[in-house]
Amino acid sequence: MKTNLLDRRTLLKMAGLTALTAALGQGCMARPTATPGPARHRPMPVLVAEDRIIRTDVALRPFRPSGFVVRSVRYDAKTVIHNYGHGGAGISLSWGTAALAVAEAQQTGAQTCAVLGCGAVGLAAARLLQRHGWQVTIYARDLPPATFSNVPGGQWAPVAVCDFSKMTPEFDQQLRLASRFGLRALQDMVGSQYGVRWLDHYILKNEPIQLPWYHENVRDLLPGHVDLQPSEHPFASPYVRRTASLLVDPSIYLNAVMRDFLLAGGRIVVREFNELAEILSLAEPVIVNCTGIGAGSLFADEEIFPVKGQLVVLLPQPEIDYILGAEGMLSMMPRQDAILLGSTREPGVWDLTPNPDEIERVAAGHAKIFNAMRGT
Ligand SMILES: Cc1cc2nc3c(=O)[nH]c(=O)nc-3n(C[C@H](O)[C@H](O)[C@H](O)COP(=O)(O)OP(=O)(O)OC[C@H]3O[C@@H](n4cnc5c(N)ncnc54)[C@H](O)[C@@H]3O)c2cc1C
């Protein structure tokens, strides 16, 4: 029989989350917004030209208007803990929703579990369960580098997660906790081993720039935002802000986390599931569902849909050490293996074929910005 365990566990869970919150720094005294110092050096232009394009990558964001799902569902002797639907922020939120999922798992009394999915969300959940003493087996159809989590630049920014008009107070709390946990956990992974680094993020706008919703929630974990005068930056834009941002390079990061998982005794089984009965026949008593967009058909979730995104991938430029975001949904992120130009959002589109009109729009928009940089 299927029973939703969320309600009767709310009090216990909140107690667990309070402890997690303290452990991850929510209890720290909030600092006033710091003013970041000067940029390390003047940003260099990205070379945008047809003969520098090495490919176009496409992936599907697993989007639910009411937000990601982290909750337990009981099926007779099995407990399924959902952890999916992270929209445009699965890398940012992965360790945070893993903490929420682990809080659910700890209440089962078990110590052995299956994690379904080996993208950013599944790997973070699997590692956090191991750190709490669990024996974990990952079951997944695709492993890195073939997951959708391998595609983006992985900037820490909990955005495009939900439709805010559909947000419940319960989800608001989960999102705030997951954002803080996610950011704090990635701070511990900064370095070449995990491909996580702090970079300057330049935001270019035609109008005064608003603070993002998450600023107040994480202001003690992220340095402040500073508006720049024209003499302080090379961009031809009326409003320019510089912030500090964490960037995860999934081509390094996912392999490193997968290696940690295996070194800690984890097991990986390559397997595709086609229906719920196959999942419930697994030996493990607890199953953590991190199948991203795959969760919709496996668990009959009619709310989830893909938001197709594609990135124009350029030859790497080691001198590019900043992130850029601009009007017209333009973004640039540097990875070790490439420069990524985005972004696109096509809701409800499952087709993974690159859209040539969007390649043209994104490449032309970035060429205009970088060709107009002063002093270069
Ligand atoms: C263009 C673009 C840019 C983005 N930029 C950012 C960003 O800057 N920062 C950020 O935080 N996020 C970003 N995102 C969002 C982020 O990529 C996703 O939220 C994240 O990858 C979701 O991770 P996941 O592990 O849930 O899913 P996935 O990476 O899709 O992994 C799902 C796993 O489940 C497995 N699976 C699915 N179905 C089945 C099945 N039936 N049987 C067996 N296994 C199955 C898959 O094989 C895979 O292993 C971006 C997304 C796109 C498209």
Image (spheres, grey):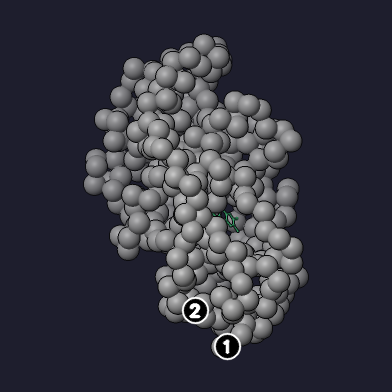
Instruction: Identify residue type, mark 1.
Output: Gly
Image coords of residue 63 (percent x, y): 64, 43
Crowd tier of the residue under label 2, counting other residues whose Cα lies within 10 Å: few below 14, some 14–19, many 20 or above: some
Q: Quadrant of the N terminus?
A: top right
Q: Residues within 10 Å of mark 1 (few under 14, many from 20)?
A: few
Please tell me the numbered disc located at residue 271: none
The C terminus is located in which quarter?
bottom right
Residue located at (56% from left, 43% from top): 216
Q: Amino acid at mark 2?
A: Arg
Q: In terms of depth relative to the viewer, which is nearer, 360 or 78?
A: 360
Q: Is any atom of residue 50 visible in this view? A: no
> Does the numbered disc 2 mark a residue whose Cβ is under 8 Å from ligand 1?
no
Residue placed at 45% from the left, 65% from the top? Answer: 37
Q: Is disc 1's CB within 8 Å of ligand 1?
A: no
Label 2 SS: loop
127 left or right, relative to 331: left
Q: For numbered disc 1, what is the local secondary structure? A: loop
Answer with the quarter of the image where residue 214 lies.
top right
* Distance Cα–Cα, label 2 vs label 1: 10 Å
Where residue 173 sits: x, y (%)? 56, 30
Nearer to me, 363 or 11: 11
Q: How many marks?
A: 2
Q: Name the residue furthest bottom.
A: 376
- Left or right: 295 with respect to 34? right
Residue drawn where x is 62% and y is 82% of the image: 373
Residue hosting label 1: 375
Disc 2, disc 1: CB below 8 Å? yes
In the rendered view, would you say 358 is above or below 112? below
In percent of width and height, residue 299 lies at: 59, 30
First reached walking from the N terminus: tag 2 or tag 1: 2
Residue where numbered disc 2 is placed: 42
Give 357 or 247, whichever is nearer the viewer. 247
